[in-house]
Amino acid sequence: MYNETDILKIASYFNISKEELINELDASGLHIKYGQKNISRETGFKIYNILTENRKKTVNNKILKTDIEMNSINRMEYYIKNFKIFLDTSSLLDDEIYLFIDNIVPLLKTNNKKILVIPQVGMELEKHANRSNDEKLKEKSKKIILILNKLIKQNLIEVIGGTNESFADNVFLSVFTKFRIDHNLLLITEDKKLANDIENLSNIASVKTNKVINVRKINRYGFLSKHNLNKTTDIYDSKIKSIRTNNENKKIIQHEAFKLFTKVSESINKPLSISILPKVGDILLNEKGEKIKLMNEIASGGEGIIYETDSKYIAKIYKKDQLNTRKFEKIKKMISIKIDNSSICYPREILYTTNQEFVGYLMPKAKGKELQKSLFINQLLKKNFPYWNRKNSVELCLTILEKIKYLHERNIILGDINPMNILVVSSKEVYFVDTDSYQIEGYPCPVGTINFTAPEIQRKSFNEFLRTFQNEYFAVSTLLFMIMLPGKPPYSQQGGESPIDNIIKMDFSYRLGDKTNHKTPIGQWRYMWSHLPYFVKESFYNTFHYEGSNSKPQNRINVIKWISIFKRYEKLILDGTLINQDEMALDVFPKRVKKISKFNYEKCSICKMEHKDSQMRKGICNECLSKGEHYSCKKCGKHMIYTNNQKFLQNKPKFETCFECFDGKERMYQILSCTICYSTFNIPYNEYKKLKNNNLPIPRECKKCKSNNTTKAKKNNINKQPYNVLSIGNAFSNLINNFYKK
């Protein structure tokens, strides 16, 4: 068994704390409890493999960057493009300087930029290399000087500033004061005092500029991290934290996001007493004591009733059996952070009776029709949105993704993502409802549906654990798939197992190149799939197929990545690329597979659709050839079809009776050889039918032999002869009889 010390050793090996290790494992679907002292050796290996997999991804034996590494690279590239970057002596002598150089040099070359070094830094390095009593410092300084000279020759480092001042810190202060008006400046240093002095230059009120000064240090991975100073300003960080709400940029500060929990809150749940449930016309109070009047009832569900009020919000009033301390605590926690998005019908204010009894909450009013009932059925789609096309479907995906991104940025997990909780007004206006079930902090989302539940949490009780963002990404991917193939879950298949088994096995049926399990639903679903761009199909395949590169929880495509994928799709639609390739590219329900440029196409004379010439025969497609006129047999009523293939290609007449009934008396079922005289005889269809209906065997003797045998049997019975002559053939039987007569 592994004990707690071994778990700490694993965490130490990967340079993370025990808490970080537990959180990372939880996000990857392996749950280790806080305080758990012993784990099996097998689990220990699993932990090691998960942490290793999270840090290294390979494709064709090439190591790819992890998400964390990519974020650090993107941050560094942002600085290179937008800042003048200075290195001081302390950073050049840092233990991780070699990693830093390896990371930054490719970015400098790509962007044709340089790092700036003042002469005083070179002078300090030369001093250490020539006069230092510390041998390690001496050797290190020599190596750094050689590296700097090499980078100067490659035009990746530029030396700027005067040599009059001997102290480097003073030169940095002077240079930054001079350049700060026209440039964003970044100093990389390990010296906290210098870092603080440089950042304080931003506070000089007499200088008017919109440029900023940042100070960073080199971390253990060779990337850049903040100093723990009292005040920092970072354009990149503020952009990362900013989100778009109602087309306005707002900055999310720390208290605007919920904390991330790894286990369910253990608070005791008790029913709340209430004297009488409010109804239409009753007065309720919000937390400010303001009166809210219930007007008309809008809808009723399992949990409660929705009312219009005399305010700008509508009210959800819980039923008596739904009122408990846990629900009250959760709603109270939810409204502690403001969700400033009117299309997310999120709790805004708690409602009480005049006796201060909790009964529900106020929320924005939703509009539109359920996604499930408006877009996922062809007839209803045509009725509700008659001009809807694939461009609208892609726009709808992006609209929904932006709202989910908004919630995820505040550490809100929707949990029960499904098309019944999304109302659609148009492709660019949707409303999220049933939001009080969202997961926040230690309060789980207690509900879910099979199609939108990730494989690793199938058959689990939703109110007993907390979902992770990785679980949510599976549900998001499923929703996108069902919008692009209206109403069809990704694991529906032809002749497959139950949906839950297909999901757990990740048995995805839709073809990607030559990869298929040959269970793809027939008809329009194949056509819809074929018309998706390859990169969209690849993303879905990699997410839903057990061999896909994004099938593991830790590798799933997140919301931001999906946004970039669908924006790329939208661009191909808007610039006409897809419609130029195939006129059905924007059809929600295309009537054939997508055209491929290397094939020739011909129009079918019956369905008027274009098909590959290899699928055509005399101007008719194979599908139409198999179709035809349906009718019944005049004799037995059996269903019959007069195919287009028989009519147009084979020129056969239309038969009034089925094959079995047609000339049944004369047509033969089987030709047999008599086991007695070896002559052949026929079994007609009508005789075969009688035998079959009476459960009688097919005869093996001809009628003549059968008749002779019957006559002999009768004589033998009358004469009571003690023996029987064995007949092995008609001729042989006659010979024996003649012999006895003589």
Image (cartoon, grey):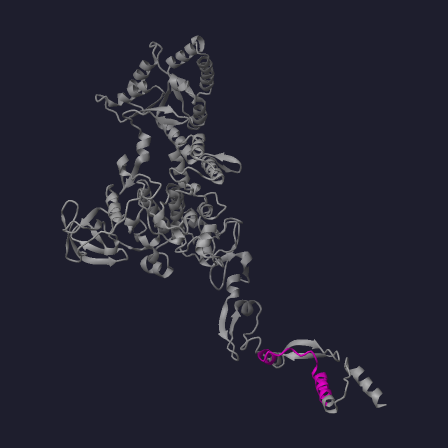
Residue 258 lies left or right of residue 57; in this view the side is: left
Q: Looking at the image, is 54 positioned above or below residue 672? A: above
Quarter residue 405 falls in: top left
Residue 614 at x, y percent in the picture: 55, 57
- Image coords of residue 293 (percent x, y): 15, 53
The answer to whether residue 339 of the structure is visible from this angle is no
| Vertical arrangement, residue 106 with respect to residue 480, above or below | above
Prevailing SS of the magenta stretch:
helix
The answer to whether 170 appears left or right of 291 in the picture is right
Q: Is residue 470 left or right of residue 732?
A: left
* Residue 684 belongs to magenta span: no
**Where, quadrant-wise, is the C terminus in this rendering?**
bottom right
101 vs 602, nearest the viewer: 101
Q: Is residue 644 visible?
A: yes
| Magenta-drawn stretch contains 709 | yes
Q: Position of residue 91 (x, y in %)?
A: 39, 20
- Residue at the far top: name it: 131
Q: Residue 215, relative to residue 620: is it above or below? A: above
Q: Tell me what residue is drawn at x 41 percent, y 57 percent.
A: 589
Position of residue 524 relative to residue 267, above or below, is below
Tally of numbered tags = 0
- Give the extent of the magenta segment: 689-714
Q: Quadrant of residue 185?
A: top left
Percent x, y of residue 80: 38, 27
